[in-house]
């Protein structure tokens, strides 16, 4: 609650438009199952037909880890993490921040005035990463300022990822290459009206955190 209050004070409606929100997500080649739409009411499990009762599960699914960032002025190209690569502080600092964020953010904010946001994942909180951001970004929301365990405060989490996943996984993919191609296509075509509307809700959601005294509001 204290951190939400602080962010509300620090970022008015105008400065929110300068924030670059970022996040990582794992996408799979299979169609996402919505368990809420698959319910059977019976007195005993034996009453459920076998073809419904037996649910196939798979290990080692083809999947793609993606890092994304966006702001009011646009989207930064997706960064794909190669299979088997561990995202440690060195990889995150070099491959994500230095090679993906910095080369692209200047085209969105040519005046050099922007604020970087990331969540409180351990790699983001690493001392070397925090020091890099102090030295290379005009402003950023440090690990002591971002509310912990708060996906409901990141536009990617509460809006963009779900929209992207629905489009990308509307049909299954035969390979990770196909999944990547679809991700790039849908990311490039993602409506900036939707992105801006999601970012426009950010301060309202911070206010809800304060109203609920730091508790859940969804």
Image (cartoon, grey):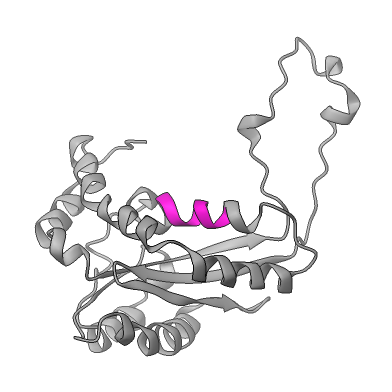
Task: Find out whether residue 136 is within the magenta segment.
Answer: no
Residue 126: x and y, percent?
Answer: 37, 75
Measured from the top left, where is residue 72 in percent x and y? 29, 67
Q: Is residue 208 left or right of residue 9?
A: right
Q: Which quarter of the figure has residue 81? A: bottom right
Does the magenta stretch mainly form a helix, a strand or a loop?
A: helix
Classify residue 58 as left or right of residue 162: right
| Residue 15 in sight in this render | yes
Residue sitting farthest toward the right: 50
Q: Please say if 132 is above or below 119.
A: below
Q: Nearer the viewer, residue 69 or 214?
A: 69
User: Which segment is the magenta one?
Assistant: 158-165
Residue 45: where, in percent of width, then height? 81, 18
Q: Is residue 73 above or below residue 196?
A: below
Q: Residue at x 33, y 37 (%)?
A: 216
Could you say which quadrant of the image residue 52 lies in? top right
Q: 138 or 167: nearer the eye?
A: 167
Residue 5 x, y percent position in the rendering: 14, 50
Q: Does 159 lie within the magenta span? A: yes
Taking the view exactly as shown, the residue that stands out farthest to the left is: 9
In percent of the image, x 50 and y 67: which residue is there?
189
Residue 11 seen by the camera: no
Q: Quadrant of the C terminus?
A: top left
Identify the residue shown where x is 18% and y is 41%: 210
Query: Is residue 43 placed above or below 159 in the rendered structure?
Result: above
What is the quadrant of residue 168 in the picture? bottom right
**Side of 36 relative to 60 (left or right):** left
């Amino acid at each position: 609650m204290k951190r939400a209050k602080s962010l509300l004070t620090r970022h008015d409606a105008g400065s929110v438009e300068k924030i670059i929100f970022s996040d990582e997500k794992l996408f799979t080649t299979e169609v996402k199952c919505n368990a809420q739409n698959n319910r059977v009411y019976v007195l005993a499990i034996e009453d459920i037909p076998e073809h419904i009762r037996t649910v196939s599960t798979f290990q080692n699914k083809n999947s793609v880890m993606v890092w994304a960032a966006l702001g009011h002025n646009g989207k930064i190209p997706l960064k794909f993490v190669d299979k088997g690569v561990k995202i440690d502080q060195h990889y995150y600092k070099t491959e994500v921040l230095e090679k993906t964020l910095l080369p692209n953010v200047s085209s969105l904010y040519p005046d050099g005035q922007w604020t970087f946001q990331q969540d409180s994942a351990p790699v983001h909180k690493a001392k070397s990463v925090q020091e890099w951001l102090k030295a290379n970004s005009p402003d950023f929301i440090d690990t002591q300022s971002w509310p912990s365990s708060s996906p409901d405060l990141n536009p990617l989490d509460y809006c963009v990822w779900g929209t992207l996943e629905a489009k990308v996984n509307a049909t299954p993919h035969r390979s990770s290459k196909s999944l990547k191609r679809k991700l790039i296509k849908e990311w490039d075509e993602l409506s900036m009206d939707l992105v801006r509307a999601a970012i426009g809700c950010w301060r309202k959601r911070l206010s809800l955190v304060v109203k609920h005294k730091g508790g859940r509001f969804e």
